[in-house]
Amino acid sequence: MIVVTGSVTARQDSFDEVKRLSLEHVRRSRTEPGCISHAVNIDCENPLRLVFFEQWADRAALLTHFAVPASRAFVKQLQSLASAATTIEIYDATKLEKL
């Protein structure tokens, strides 16, 4: 499984648009093949920061997601609305049995 985390910090004047675009992106992404989960949350310590958490079946599914024109457009839109650089981290994860 591939795990993706990311974040964007909106400007005060762009937060509502960033939130709208993010929810739209998450809902669309959930319908893509190989998407296990895709969520966006508001950071409790910085209410202008949205945090993404995604799980993908494999690398191929994630690469397909990144190639979707709407995904590329979403990233471009966020960059113009953010107060700082967006972040993304990708992990290759293995689920462990209960300890």
Image (tube, grey):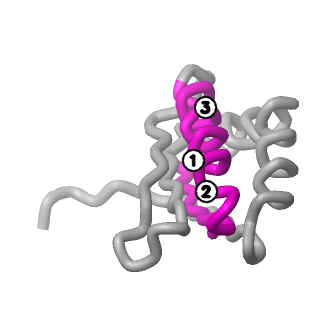
**Residue 88: x, y in percent?**
67, 65
- Position of 78 with respect to 54 (left or right) is right
**Looking at the picture, does residue 77 appear above or below residue 73?**
below
Q: Position of residue 10 (x, y in %)?
A: 65, 65
The answer to which image quadrant residue 68 occupies is top right
- Is residue 58 or residue 10 the one in the foreground? 10
The residue that appears at 60% across and 39% down in the rendered structure is: 20
Residue 22 lies, with reference to residue 34, above or below; the image says below
**Residue 15 tag number:** 2
Viewer-closest of 86 and 64: 86
**Quarter of the view holding residue 89:** bottom right
Kindly identify the amino acid type of the residue bearing the numbered disc 2.
Phe
- Secondary structure beneath disc 1? helix
Q: Is residue 24 magenta?
A: yes
Local crowd size for mark 2, using a 10 Å CA cut-off: few (<14), some (14–19), many (≥20):
many
Disc 1 target residue: 19
Which residue in the structure is indicated by mark 3?
A: 24
How many neighbours does mark 1 have within 10 angstroms: few (below 14), some (14-19), or many (20 or more)? many
| Position of residue 59 measured from the top left corner of the image (x, y, whole percent) | 67, 45
* Badge 2 vs badge 1, beta-carbon distance below 8 Å: yes
In the depicted structure, whether residue 33 falls above or below residue 81: above
**Which residue is pictured at 51% across the width and 48% down the height?**
54
* Residue at the spot 76% in from the left edge and 54% down from the top edge: 78
The residue lying furthest to the front in this view is: 13
| Quadrant the C terminus occupies | bottom left
Provide residue 11's location: percent of width, then percent of height: 68, 68
Q: Find the distance from the CA under tag 2 to the CA under tag 1.
A: 6 Å
Q: Which residues are magenta?
A: 1-30
